[in-house]
Image (spheres, helix red, strand yellow):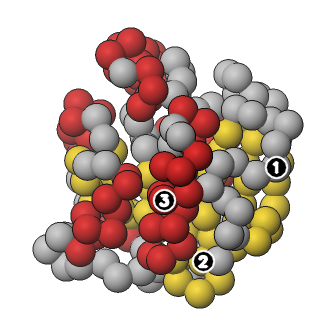
Amino acid sequence: MAKKIIAALTDSTVFLREWFTNPQRTGSVTPSSPQLADAMARWLPSDPESFVLELGPGTGAVTEALLRHGLREDRLVAIEHNPKLAKLLREKFPRAHIITGDAWNLDELLRELAEPIESVSAVISSLPLLNFHPKEAEALAEKIRAILEPKGKWVQYSYQIGALRPRGSSNFRLHASKVVWFNLPPARVSVFQK
């Protein structure tokens, strides 16, 4: 128990420091709560061979929930813009494919892997889309749409809890939506289907 508390404090400290460095890219001063992470992880594909793409994993709070909910670590591909956080993720999840890069280049980054990935069953995104221009969010959504398998799901959270749809989701069918109150601040998890 003490190890978990120390790890959570360390992650929060790293997260806060990186937020001060670049608040637009980090989006929050604290990592996702276990409740928010679990609300996102419950949408994993049922096929254990499927790849899942995580965008903006930060210190790995959602990543840990994905693995707890049954995702095989070698089936996880995560794109983290911040090199310090990407290094931390590689240490925590050595069998996952952790890429340091820009989520808006996800198609190129997936093609450049030693074993290129053409499609994924789910995209789990913690990117702060409200911090970006609507056209940028739409461009990212198009790339997500292109990489998703048929009936694939895009799981996105937003701190704008009054809106069912975050930026960029207009070309997706809304599958489910839920507010997670036990998060700082509260967040809405929206699930879209291709």
Q: Which mark is residue 139?
A: 3
Q: Residue at x 54, y 62 (%)?
A: 141
- Residue that label 2 marks: 152
Q: Nearer the viewer, residue 41 or 54?
A: 54
Q: Quadrant of residue 96?
A: bottom left
Q: Label 1 neighbourhood size at 10 Å, few (<14), some (14-19), many (20+)?
A: some
Point out residue 139 in the picture as x, y percentages from the top left corner: 48, 59
Q: Residue 8: image x %, image y %?
A: 47, 23
Kindly identify the residue that appears in the image at 79 percent across and 65 percent down: 174
From what the image shows, is residue 140 above or below residue 26?
below
Quadrant placement of the C terminus:
bottom right
Could you say which is closer to the camera, residue 152 or residue 3? 152
**Residue at the extreme front of the image, as rendered:** 135
Labels 3 and 1: the sequence-earlier one: 3
Image x and y of residue 172, in percent: 69, 70
Q: Amino acid at mark 2?
A: Gly
Tell me, for residue 180, which label it has, or none. Answer: none
Residue annotated with mark 1? 164
Compared to residue 127, the image places residue 67 above or below, namely below
How far is the residue under mark 2 from the one under mark 3?
18 Å
- Evaluate whether residue 130 shows in this view: yes
Residue 111 placement, left or right of 17: left
Q: Which residue sits at x=22%, y=36%? A: 83
Task: Check disc 1 and give the amino acid type.
Answer: Leu
Q: Are marks 3 and 1 in contact (CB under 8 Å)?
A: no
Label 2: state its secondary structure.
Answer: strand
Q: Position of residue 73 (x, y in %)?
A: 37, 62
Q: CA distance from mark 2 to mark 1?
A: 19 Å
**Amino acid found under the numbered disc labelled 3:** Ala
